Image (cartoon, helix red, strand yellow):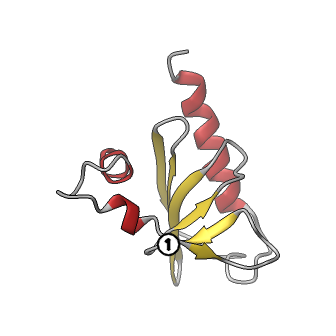
């Protein structure tokens, strides 16, 4: 999570890279709140606020890194299944992202 905070707060690389990294284009006209940038998705309307992140897939595994910019924390995980991922028959990844984010948010100082 240290990497995500440094990257998305503009501290990971010298120089003004963040603006270029976050330069994005719409994913589809059916989803105006989602953009795709340099290797990451930007979702303006996530269940716990806007996110920057990326999901990865290889046979048998799925991973996710989401940075919740409004709250200043990241969630990352990898699970050793891909059942239901390619055919979108499960929402396990989105559910894990949201549940982990909510747990962290309850632990943040108010």
Left or right: residue 16 compared with residue 93: left
> Nearest the camera: 81 or 106?
106
Question: Mark 1 highlights which residue?
Answer: 37
Tell me if mark 1 has few (under 14), some (14-19) or many (20+) residues whose alpha carbon lies within 10 angstroms of its own: some
Q: Which residue is drawn at 50% across and 67% down?
A: 54
Q: Which residue lies furthest to the top in this view?
A: 110
Number of disc labels? 1
Coordinates of residue 25 in the picture (x, y in percent): 59, 76
Classify 81 as above or below 97: below
Q: Is residue 62 left or right of residue 12?
A: right
Q: Is residue 45 left or right of residue 11?
A: right
- Quarter of the image with the C terminus is top right
Closer to the camera in the image, 96 or 35: 35
Q: Which residue is drawn at 20% across and 58% down?
A: 15
Q: In this view, does 70 lie above or below 98?
A: above
Residue occupying image coordinates x 72% and y 62% = 33
The residue sitting at 67% across, 77% down in the picture is 27
Residue 83: x and y in percent read 67, 76
In the displayed structure, 4 sits above or below 87; it is above
> Is residue 67 in sight in this rendering?
yes
Disc 1 element: loop
């Amino acid at each position: 999570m240290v990497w995500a905070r440094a990257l998305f707060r503009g501290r990971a690389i010298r120089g003004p890279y963040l603006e270029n990294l976050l330069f994005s284009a719409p994913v589809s006209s059916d989803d105006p709140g989602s953009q795709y940038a340099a290797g990451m998705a930007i979702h303006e309307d996530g269940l716990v606020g806007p996110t920057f992140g990326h999901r990865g897939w290889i046979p048998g595994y799925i991973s996710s890194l989401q940075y919740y910019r409004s709250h200043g924390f990241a969630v990352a995980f990898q699970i050793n299944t891909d059942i239901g991922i390619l055919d979108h028959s499960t929402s396990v990844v989105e559910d894990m992202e949201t549940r982990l984010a909510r747990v962290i948010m309850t632990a943040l100082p108010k």
